[in-house]
Image: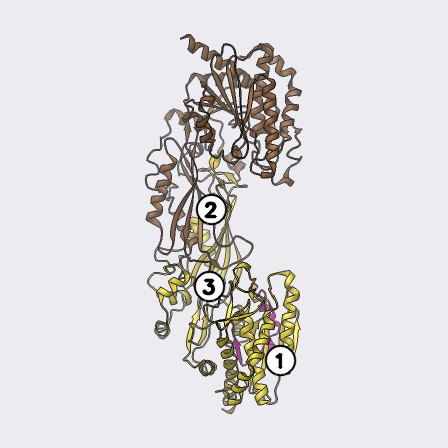
Chain colours: A yellow, B brown
Amino acid sequence: MPAKELIKYLQAHRDEQLEQLFELLRFPSISSQSPREGDCLACVERIAEHLRGLGFSAELRPWRRHPILLARRACDRPAGRLLIYGHYDVQPPDPLEQWQTPPFEPAIRDGRIYARGASDDKGQLFAHVKAVEAILATRGELPLEVIFFVEGEEEIGSPELERFVTGAAAELAAEFAVVSDSDFFAAGLPTLTYGLRGLAYVELTLAGPREDLHSGVHGGAAVNPLNAVARMLSGMHDERGRVTLPGFYDDVVELTAAERRAWAELPFDKAAYAAAIGADPAGGERGLPVLERRWARPTLDCNGIVGGYQGEGAKTVIPASATAKISMRLVPNQRPEKAVESLERYVAENTPAGVRASVKVSAQARPVLTALDSPAVAAAKRALKDAFGAEVALVRNGASVPITELIQRVLKVDPILMGFGLPDDNLHAPNEHFRLEQFYGGIAASAALIVNLAGLARDAQGD
Amino acid sequence: MPAKELIKYLQAHRDEQLEQLFELLRFPSISSQSPREGDCLACVERIAEHLRGLGFSAELRPWRRHPILLARRACDRPAGRLLIYGHYDVQPPDPLEQWQTPPFEPAIRDGRIYARGASDDKGQLFAHVKAVEAILATRGELPLEVIFFVEGEEEIGSPELERFVTGAAAELAAEFAVVSDSDFFAAGLPTLTYGLRGLAYVELTLAGPREDLHSGVHGGAAVNPLNAVARMLSGMHDERGRVTLPGFYDDVVELTAAERRAWAELPFDKAAYAAAIGADPAGGERGLPVLERRWARPTLDCNGIVGGYQGEGAKTVIPASATAKISMRLVPNQRPEKAVESLERYVAENTPAGVRASVKVSAQARPVLTALDSPAVAAAKRALKDAFGAEVALVRNGASVPITELIQRVLKVDPILMGFGLPDDNLHAPNEHFRLEQFYGGIAASAALIVNLAGLARDAQGD
């Protein structure tokens, strides 16, 4: 439990914490937009200044389009090393007209900070910075060596990040790692995420006639690549909603009985979820609970079909080709390369006469599953419980966060996915916000985590 | 057979005919582009001037976006009335960079006139104008009352044309009608078209989640409208390539043995056709000849799918909705309304849980089949044979030409589809062209047709 002075310090400095976060939120650090390169740089430089002010050696490493900040603070008798990951880039704010207040002019309403990046990820990242500050202010020293790894291309998919992590593996080496870029399962329910799905994203192209053809003149003779791609996509699921690609489920690890029981106890209301997404959650494999389908089962989703005519009204065209964008979400122990092979095998066996198929891989990420019962997880649970005053849920998530798999596989440490957001924070959407109580609670939780992990490391050294 | 003087007149005036056609081809009368409204008007006004110069009363009737030209030339002792249809509007010339010479600067190369609209339809329409001129110049009088009906919205689908034709039915009434907006089956093979397919164009929309969802977070729970639309499209054909919509084939008139024999004798080479379209013509119903599949069998083709992400690279989205654009080509005696009903019935029975389906009708046209053995067809065959010096083929075509069905149904006269184009004229594509021999031959054929039809009408009156 954080010491009393630390709690007092945090409470006494809330206005300042908020004002400094607002300053970061004013940078329109949109990584996907070239004209914002200067804003991205200014934002990460400001974070570097904060860390330098706390005694960190903070360096901006030039990277593809936006630099990566590496900052480190040694200490006299470190119990171990903690890697803290965050990102300073944000999604574009469009559509602008749907924001109640401008996305880069942070505003408080109903106990929430409204701004692009408030929850994803500046607010969550800055909570760690302020936790470090509070520990230093009250103890004069950090009990662990802390390394900040702050990237600026998360919102464009962290391309080539493996190359960076591999190259900087020695500098990033740590006994502990924490990633705060996720959310609570529900308000009032502090949450650790111990599993993420992987991804294989492919484009299946069927090439037919040399050029787009008139569907009247040639319809019935030319094979229509759109008809054909619909048929092939349709064949990728059976009547029970299972993926039919050969060998697709071979490496799927079934959910354990313990996990299934734990998930059944989560406060998940199917009707409320249906209302939230605006549709009956009847997708995926028949007969399985919604959370299992979202978190522990692989999927195959078409994300778009290119070819023919997408404009208004009618155009009677048989397109020269059709391309289906397909994302497969993968679960332990599936591998993206094997999923792609399964799809390629299916394509080879199911391409109709009159079209030629090709498959292009756009993105791949492995699934992540971390230990549920490690001392680090126990330390994180205690930190969250102390900071937010409630028992902690352990969940998985259906999405992928590229850095987590790299931390596990390249740096060989299980990342602690301790997010402070809430499910209704409107990430990537207008009116993104971050609750004040989550921000302040996040700072306290981060400080407690650092202290707990240091204790853990000392105990281990004492053994 | 046209009289000798007429032939002499035509040959003596070839330069003038060509120069005047060039003048029409220089108008960029692109009906789909608002800034071209003035060019469309100037083009049709020039055609009206030509006809007024030949003693026609020519009026521009204001219509939706581009006026319709109605021109009439009475004569002293008319044997009957002939309606001649054509259109002065053209397709956009894009992509411009693929034209060898600018699309609106006509140029002659290898005996071909290169320009947008050369074949479709200014060259074919103007052949009739020049035929009338030649008859008047050599005989002093037309043997028939001739009515020109020249529209400017054919390339945008002749919207609402039924309303116009119905309103002007008395003025358009005629014993004969000719439409020259088609082509020979092959070079050297003059062709009459006696059948066209109809069309029902619908948009099937499947609505799922309220907003686009993240395919990682919600994949496996939310029903994906793109997956669902692919499945529904796939189910619309069986393994043999037949359309499965309930009752879809109920009203299909089977090809007669005589037609099948006649088509088998056409100079159609499947390998050459495959080379021309750049793909194996393995579409449509298994086991039927290519021409039968293109001309006499109905089809269902997806022309585009809207929803999700069509840009470059990966976006992991479950779209809020997906819309399939679907064109059904119909054959006698199918009706577009019944085809739409079939599709709606299929949709009602096959929409999966989790999405809501709706069907919107974009366009409808009935199939056309005209008598093969009428005296007018015989007259047209003689005219074509005399003008081009070869036996005439009778074919159908898989496309729809809206005016033909209106002439047949509203004006109650079988249109003669006597086209002068060739299959490789590059209609709607870069480097559209019209062969000089087809233009000059078309003028002679039109003149012969007028003379032959007049003779026919006189014979009928004599009965």
Respond whether the residues carrying marks 3 and 1 are from the same subunit.
no
Say whether marks 3 and 1 touch (CB < 8 Å). no
Label 1 Cα neighbours within 10 Å, binned few <14 / some 14-19 / many ≥20: many
Q: Which residues are magenta?
A: A156-182
Label 2 Cα neighbours within 10 Å, binned few <14 / some 14-19 / many ≥20: many
Taking the image as drawn, is residue B116 in sight?
Answer: no
Nearest the viewer among A82 and A206 is: A82
Name the chain under label 2: A
Q: Which x, y percent locates residue B308?
A: 48, 54
| Residue identified by numbered label 2 | A226
Q: Compared with residue B218, is residue A346 higher up or lower down, i.e. above or below?
A: above
In percent of the image, x 40 and y 38: which residue is there?
Answer: B285
Name the chain under label 3: B
Name the amino acid, label 1.
Answer: Arg
Q: Please indicate whether residue B306 sits to the left or right of residue A28 in the image.
A: left
Residue A372 covered by magenta stretch: no
Quadrant in the rendering for residue A149: bottom right
Name the chain under label 1: A
**Residue at mark 3 to residue at mark 2: CA–CA distance:** 26 Å
Q: Which x, y percent locates residue A221?
A: 46, 37
| Residue identified by numbered label 1 | A72
| Residue identified by numbered label 3 | B216
SS for tag 1? strand
Respond whether the residues carrying marks 3 and 2 are from the same subunit.
no
SS for tag 3? helix
